[in-house]
Image (cartoon, rainbow, N blue to C red):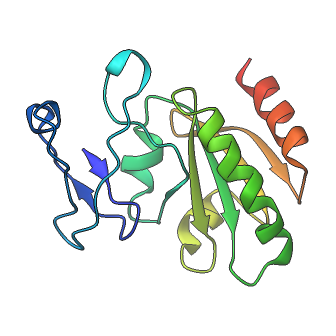
Amino acid sequence: MIRCPTCGSVNRVPPEKIAQGLQPVCGKCKTPLPIDKGPINKGPIDKGPIVVTDSSFASEVEQSPLPVLIDMWAPWCGPCRMVAPAVEAIAAEMAGRVRVAKMNVDDNPAVSARFNVQSIPTLLLIKGGREINRLVGAQPKAEIARWLERALA
């Protein structure tokens, strides 16, 4: 299963097609799908943040085998836009150890209310469907990475 980076659709891609060297494309928008391999070639991994919604939260976050760092943000929020490049860099650097997701709080009020998100940007660390840590407010990348490493230890 590979999520389209453009439209967010989940696509079933047979591993034998990738082994044949074929480039998978999204069934909905026809965008080429990323096929980077994870540790020890166990399959595709997310190298950037995935977009999570109220409806996809259970499948993408609660059922994730990895801890999930969720960036709770809104497009009008200046500090959220300042944190975004750091979150994207952490997603690439920690791929395979932690999944990174972004959730627009304006479009997804149910999850925002469930975790009592009062201020943005808020970074939530979720493991097994439960919040294990949170960081509120804009922070530099080094501080976010330090916080994440401590929380994962």
At horizontal 22% and vertical 62% (from top left) the residue drawn is 26
Q: How many marks overall?
A: 0
At horizontal 80% and vertical 36% (from top left) the residue drawn is 145
User: Splitting the image into 4 quarters, where does residue 102 fall?
Assistant: bottom right
In the image, 122: left or right of 19? right
x and y percentages locating residue 135 in the rendered image: 83, 48
At horizontal 41% and vertical 27% (from top left) the residue drawn is 38
**Where 17 sits versus 66, above or below?**
below
x and y percentages locating residue 116 in the rendered image: 72, 61
User: Splitting the image into 4 quarters, where does residue 40 fall?
Assistant: top left
In the image, 152: left or right of 27? right
x and y percentages locating residue 18 in the rendered image: 17, 37
Q: Quadrant of the C terminus?
A: top right
In the image, 27: left or right of 147? left
Q: Is residue 119 visible?
A: no
Farthest residue in the bottom direction? Answer: 76
Q: Quadrant of the N terminus?
A: top left
Nearer to the camera, 54 or 96: 96
Q: Is residue 130 visible?
A: yes
x and y percentages locating residue 113 in the rendered image: 64, 66
At horizontal 73% and vertical 61% (from top left) the residue drawn is 84
In the image, 99: left or right of 132? left
**Where 25 sits versus 95, above or below?**
below
**Where 25 sits versus 91, above or below?**
below
